Image (cartoon, rainbow, N blue to C red):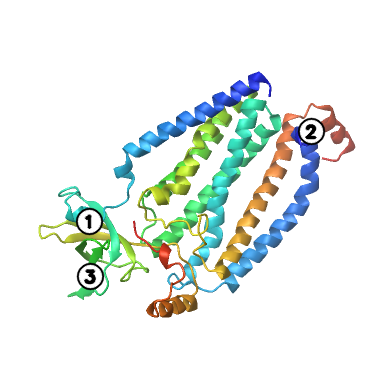
Amino acid sequence: MFRWFHKLASTRNFYRLSEILSPWLSVLCALLLGAGIFLGLFVAPTDYEQGESYRIIFVHVPAAWLSMFVYMVMAFCSLLVLVWKMKLADIVAEVSAPIGASFTFLALATGSLWGKPMWGTWWEWDARLTSELILLFIYIGYMALRASIDNPSSRSRAAAILALVGVVNIPIIHFSVDWWNTLHQPASIMKFDKPSIHPSMLQPLLLCALGFTVFYWVLMLIKSRTLILERESKSSWVQERITENRL
Amino acid sequence: MHPKRKQKLILVGLMVAAVAIAAGFILTAFNSNIQLFFSPSEVVAGEVPEGAEFKVGGLVAANSVKRIGDGLTVEFELTDNGETIPVQYTGILPDLFREGQGTVSVGKLDENGVFIAKKVLAKHDENYMPPEVADALEKAKTNKAQPYGADTVQMQ
């Protein structure tokens, strides 16, 4: 297990793995998202109260989950950077940040679009909405911090510390709807109880969520490859690949 | 594990714990500011800011919604199943507004204890189901069977 981990941790092996995996994962992602969106938009029944408007959950909920999941990946990578000085973890964390920020923005934007007709407001300073907005600011701050430090080793350390400090926000986002009274409804699925969403709607939602997750893996793998080439451009294996013209 | 790495791991752990504790203190201190709204019980108990604008949240009491005069002004009662307060609002109500539904109203108390809302927001619960299921539940409810998800419908 540890040897396998060490092998994967080498940027060269990861590059190879990414080359093999990303086309397959892309196909899987297209299938999952295609099925999820089709079932969600055309097959799933309308909601008894919200009518058709509820269908935004098929984008909103996966985006919100991924905004937190990507952050947890980033935080875990930061731990690997700080304790084990793992180069690859720094690369994964760096490429994940803009993806996570995009998911956060998507969750906020779709929520706002839904909020206007349903709640009667685009925005309310309730705990869930505010903590998700703070997550967006943490992502932006993280990217800005990376962009502002030139020295590679201090850049990765500073970024890792910021990511680990920001991790306290994740449980706050998740439990905000239980700890305080909010306009945002409590969790329908991520709770220790049976989901309060009908199976015919839950199925496409889970497909979409899985599709979004695979989408993240695909983007992360492809973007990491670019960054690996950039950082290791002087290494022999990259030079070899350049001369053989197979990047 | 290498002792130096172990030390670093402990340091990172302590840092995250310290930040978590700090965040915990801050959130506890600001608890009342983070709450989005007051409940009708708090309004009746006089725990709300006097003469200032605030938010009150609760369920729209059954058979309490009345339209008066101009057709735009609505009067209804807001309840948390303990206390009830009267609310008056002039304007367009959100789609989800109905009796039994959770709402959050923004406004002020007038001298008669009526809450004059300048904005009414509807709160949605976490239940999603097709209309046929909702109908079936309604029937089951009248037959006093345990309805699907009824134990989770709640207002805080």
- Is any atom of residue A216 visible in this view? yes
The residue carrying mark 3 is B74
Which quarter of the rendered picture does the N terminus of chain A lie within? top right
In the image, residue A211 above or below residue B145:
above
State the image coordinates of residue A159 (x, y, percent, origin top left).
Answer: 57, 30
Q: Could you tell me the amino acid type at mark 3?
A: Val
State the image coordinates of residue A103 (x, y, percent, origin top left).
Answer: 56, 49
Question: Residue at left 31%, top 67%?
Answer: B93
State the image coordinates of residue B150 (x, y, percent, origin top left).
Answer: 42, 67
* Image side of residue B42 versus residue A39, left or right: left
Q: Residues within 10 Å of mark 1 (few under 14, many from 20)?
A: some
Q: Residues within 10 Å of mark 2 (few under 14, many from 20)?
A: few
Secondary structure beneath dot 2 equals helix
Question: Residue at left 23%, top 58%?
Answer: B40
* Image side of residue A172 versus residue B89, left or right: right
Q: Could you tell me the amino acid type at mark 1?
A: Ser
The residue carrying mark 1 is B41
